[in-house]
Amino acid sequence: MNHRTLTVSVGDDFADLADARNVTVEELAQEAIARFLSTEATLVRHEAMRLALRHGSLLRRLGE
């Protein structure tokens, strides 16, 4: 897996939340980003399925 560095600016509230959850700001940010990406991936899969179902005959013809 390829890892890239991402810089995220957070406010004091975010740091307070991390402290209250007994995790680092970095861990909390990683969790938030992972949740966001998971949600986006689910939306993309659903849209792809909708399009595939709607245009199945065209996709089959293109695949020949």
Image (spheres, rainbow, N blue to C red):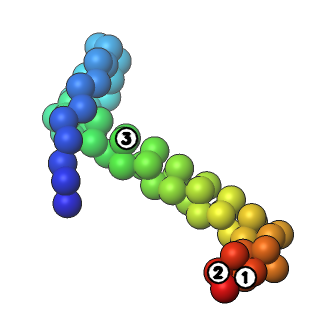
Q: Amino acid at mark 1?
A: Arg
| Camera-side residue of 26 and 61 | 61
Q: Element under label 2?
A: helix
Q: Which residue is mark 3?
A: 32
Pair 2/3: label in front: 2
Residue at left 20%, top 41%? 4
Q: Element under label 1?
A: helix
Q: Which residue is mark 2?
A: 63
How much space separates mark 2 and mark 3, taking CA atoms?
38 Å
How much space separates mark 1 and mark 3, taking CA atoms?
38 Å
How much space separates mark 1 and mark 2, taking CA atoms?
5 Å
Residue at left 37%, top 41%? 32
Residue at left 51%, top 56%? 41
Q: Are marks 1 and 2 in contact (CB under 8 Å)?
A: yes
Compared across the picture, whether 27 is left or right of 43 comes to left
Q: Element under label 3?
A: helix
User: Disc count in the image?
Assistant: 3
Rendered position, 47 above or below 57: above
Residue at left 44%, top 49%? 37
Q: Which quadrant would the C terminus be assigned to in this image?
A: bottom right
Rendered position, 39 above or below 55: above
Residue extending farthest bottom? 64
Residue 63 percent coordinates (x, y): 64, 81
Neighbourhood count class around disc 1 (C-alpha, 10 Å): few under 14, some 14–19, many 20 upward: few
- Mark 2 vs 3, N-terminal side: 3
Q: Amino acid at mark 3?
A: Ala
Neighbourhood count class around disc 3 (C-alpha, 10 Å): few under 14, some 14–19, many 20 upward: few
Pair 1/3: label in front: 1
| Camera-side residue of 56 and 8 | 56
| Camera-side residue of 13 and 52 | 52
Residue 55 percent coordinates (x, y): 80, 70
Q: Quadrant of residue 18?
A: top left
